[in-house]
Structure formats: C-alpha cells, structure tokens
Amino acid sequence: MTATPPKVRIAPSPSGYLHVGTARAALFNYLFARHNGGKFVVRIEDTDVERSKTEYIEPIIDALRWLGLEWDEEIVYQSKRSDIYAEYLKKFMESGQGYYCFCSKETLDSKRQKAREEKRNPRYDRTCLTLTKEEIRAKLDAGEKPVIRVKMPDGDIQYDDMVSGKLTRSSEELEDFVVARSDGSVTYNFAVVVDDHTMGITHVIRGNDHITNTFKQLVVYKALGVEVPVFGHVPMILRPDKKKVSKRLGDKGVGEFRDEGILPEAMINYLSLLGWSPKTDREIYTKKELIEIFNPDNLNAANAVFDPEKLEAFNREHILLMSDHDLATQLAPLLIEAGYTSKYWLETRWEYLRAVVTLFKERVRRISDFVEQSKYFFDFDYTYDEAADKKRFKPESADVLDEMANRFEALNPFTHDAIEAALTALSEEREIGKGKIIHPTRLAVSGVPAGPGLYDMLAVLGQPAVVERMRKAAEYVRGKA
RNA sequence: GGCGGUAUCGUCUAGUGGUUAGGACGGAUGGUUCUCAGCCAUCAAGCCGGGGUUCGAUUCCCCGUACCGCUACCA
C-alpha cells in the first residue's frame, strides 16, 4: 500500500499511568504499522521536568507490553536528547524564524487575562519582536534569560489529515509560541518535530486534541526545512460523563483493567472499535485479525464514549475464545493470591483446575469472576449463605442430606449420570421433589445458592469432598434446631 | 470569549439522494433449567433543529444549537 514501509510511534508523557486514550492511539499506530509491514516505536516525552515522574515510566511500558503492542526499536527518551534539540534549535535560529522574548511570565499572564476580559484572542503581542540587536545584547549581558518564540508566518496553514481531510487554520489564530524555555530546554512542539524527523516517523497518528499543535509544528517543520509526515487525528475517548479521559481527571490506567480481570485481547478489541470500524457487523476480532483488516480510511472523526459494560461483554467473548489450559494458567496464581489455595496443592491437581475452568467458563465476564465464583472448589472453609441457609436448610434436610451422602458414597463411578440417577431414585422413593434434595445439596457443598448445574458440579468436586461436605452440613442443620 | 472539530437508538457503530435505517452492548418480555449465569425467541429504543438544493432528503449545502477539543516557559 505505502511505497516505503511506514514508521509510527506512540509518545506518552509520564505524568500519569497509561490511560485508554493513549492506549488506543498506540493501538492504531501499532495496527497501521503491522498491517503495512512498517515499524512501531515508543518515545517517552519527559521534557517537562516539573510534571514528569519517573515512577510512571515503568507502568506505562508494562501496560503497553501487557496489551501486546510490541515495539520495534529501543525506547527513546526525550530527556536524553537535549544535545540533538540544541543542535536543531541553532538551525532554527539560523532560519530567522525565531526570536528572543524577555517578557516576564507575570506580564504575559496579566495581558492574557485582560485580553480575555475584553473578549479578544489572548495571543502574544510581539513586544519583543521589535527589539533591536543592541537591546537584546544589553538584556542578555544584564543576565536576563529569554525564551525563544516562533515568529508565525502570515496567511493560512493547511494540511491534509488522514481522518478529517483538509484542515486549515489562519496563523492569526496561532500565537508566537515558545519553542525554548528560559533555561534553554526546548518545549514539546519543538522537541516533537525534531524527534519525529530524526526518528524517521512517516505517519503521526494521535488524538485530535493535538490538532492545534499540528499547525504549530508545521511551522517548525518549515523553518527547519525538513520533510513533513502524514498526520492523522483520531477522536477522543470520552468518559460516560462525556469528559475527555485524561490523567488529570484521575482516569483509570490500563493496568487497572488488567487487575480487574480484563484480558488484553478484549481491551484491544474493544478499543479498536472506538473511533474505527471494520464496516461489518462482526465485532469480535483477535489482534491478528485486526492487523489484517485495519485500514485508516475507516477511522471516525467523532468522539466516542467509553462503556465499561461493553468492554466486559467483549471480555466474556475473549474468555470463550481462550483454551481451558490457558485460562487455568491465568487462574492459578489468582487463586493462590486470594488465599483460597496454595501452589503446592494446585501442583498435583491440574486436571481438577481445568475441569473447574470448564465448569465456569461460560458463566464469567472477567478472569477475576472465576476466583470468586469457584472458590469453594479450593477453599474448604466456606460458610453458608445466610438467606439460602434459612430457605434451604430445613430440619428435614438433615436426614435427606445424610441419606443422599450415603448413596453418593456407594456410587462407582461418581459421574454426572450416576449422580443424577441416585438423586432421582431417592426423590422417587421419598416422594419428594428433586428440588428438596438439589438445593440443600448445592448449599451444603458450595455454601452459595447459585452455580453450575449440580450434577456436573458434584462430579468435578469429587466423591470424597461431596460426601464429607454433605455430612458436615447435615450435622450443622441438626445443630440449628 | 476566539478558533477548530463532530452530530444515526442510552452507548459503540453500519448505511443510503427513494431502505421495514442494519448490527452490538445495555434494557424489557417469554422459553429452557435444580439455582444463578448462559442459551433461544420476541420487543422497545435513533437519523439534533431550521432553512435551502431536489420530483424526493437521515444522506448534499447554509445557519442555528449542542457536545468535545485547543487557546501555557504542559504534553
């Protein structure tokens, strides 16, 4: 499709955890690169020493890795590239597009505020543009530390967006923004241009909150005289309250979804459908399939609200897509962590764990649901659900439980059909409804009123455990009276 | 306030100058079952408003409105 393979990047800033908006931008970049046989790289935008926190870097990288968005080159850190920026800043000054500005932050702030009050566009008034060489020299000699601003050219700035088509902005609307701080470090809009250029980035796919930045960056590209990449601005992901998801608003990091039992494949699948569409009625795709069908032409321009319930529904589908073996592998550490069992106990019971997975697979929406729903398969120290106890453990249940336990004990083999036959026989002999046996038995062996089909459940639980639990319950019921 | 973008069920979306406007999540109802979940079936729910253009606009254009974003020596 593209003559030369594209190279794209995701450039998170470590001022918080990786949130879904950034994760999805990363995903689109990744899919675009993989679909076209190009490269996907990661760059950490930590030029702002005030806000960047090194402790966020690892979690961000972990989240990217968890999502399975493998990158192709070593991660680039802006904080380690100041020499490169300095070099390009020099070039930039030589182009004549930059000028020193000595205005103080306070002056600027008050002017801005005043402009706002007078309902004018609060752009920089170019006070320092008219400074003579001598004046500049004098200020510099006096030890004043200037910032460097871009002198915005006149006229319209235009580019063709992958998502929104032709976009135009009058440079009147853009102010002479700062490219270098008074301490000599460069700001975002300058660093990004230098990075994208030197890294050979061909396509920049990012959130549409960057559209204004794109126009600014275009000016820097032009001043530097370097090739401009193709830009594509994807819509924002909004929270259910329609606010943009962001670190500032304390939105969930992607890692939290992992901790809550969401599968990376489900996350990717769900995110891929926010602002992009395969244009079919199918919704469930694996990462591999997404790579195959991804086409940036199908990107939307409208913002999308993030719906955790739909994510959960996707998660369920992806759980169903996983093998029992893989699910068991994921489940084991969670059961141990929750304290329901030990590594040692589980080691010799892999088949048992797999059988439990099979039993619950269709009933869960999150990996963590397995743990809660199936804990009595591992934890023998459960208590009886209070309401169910009242409803199902009647005085006469004790005897039924004991008799049923005796008959179960005599069964060989202890299978679904044998269990059902034994239970049916007892129900007929005693002329009581099956429910009178089934419900107390379920409560006896699990402690809870709801769960998988009883016969399957007992068969998996195993004869000794079932019999023991039923007798224990019978005793408990007698003790109640 | 200025500038920009966007507008199809509650949400994610498909789609068309003439369609019963399709799917999914969620919701409701019924069925299946020992329970819950699931599964099956059925239903409710949408083209932001107003002007044009046109034989005909949800679709094209304009205006309005709403929402979102940007408007830093943040990224």
Image (spheres, coloured by chain):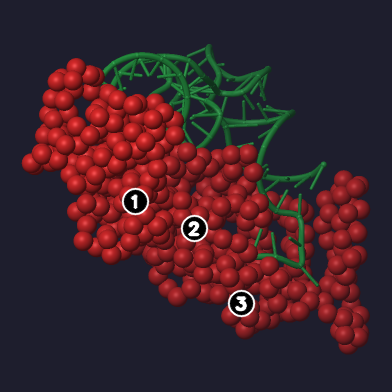
Chain colours: A red, B green
Q: Is residue B18 left or right of residue A320?
A: right
Assign a secondary structure to mark 3: helix
Q: Mark 1 points at which residue?
A: A379
Number of numbered discs visible in the structure rendering = 3
Left or right position of A405 against A235: left
Q: Are marks 2 and 1 in contact (CB under 8 Å)?
A: no
Q: In which quarter of the image is the C terminus of chain A?
A: top left
- Chain hosting mark 2: A
Task: Say which residue appears at 56% left-offset and 63% top-offset.
Answer: A12
Examine the image and state in which quarter residue A82 appears: bottom right
Give the spatial CA distance, label 2 vs label 1. 28 Å
Secondary structure beneath disc 2?
Answer: helix
A422 vs A208, nearest the viewer: A422
Vertical relation: A386 (above or below) A292: above
Depth check, front residue: A32 or A244: A244
Q: In which quarter of the image is the N terminus of chain A?
A: bottom left
* Rendered location of residue A344, percent (x, y): 28, 65
Q: Residue, x 39% and y 33% (percent of image)?
A: A480
Q: Which of marks 3 and 2 is nearer the N terminus?
A: 3
Is residue A345 in sight in this rendering? yes
Q: Mark 2 points at which residue?
A: A255
Percent x, y for residue A281? 36, 34
> Which mark is nearer the camera, 2 or 1?
1
Q: Which chain carries label 3?
A: A
Give how far across and how far down residue A148 sits, in percent. Answer: 77, 73
Three-letter amino acid code at the position of disc 1: Asp
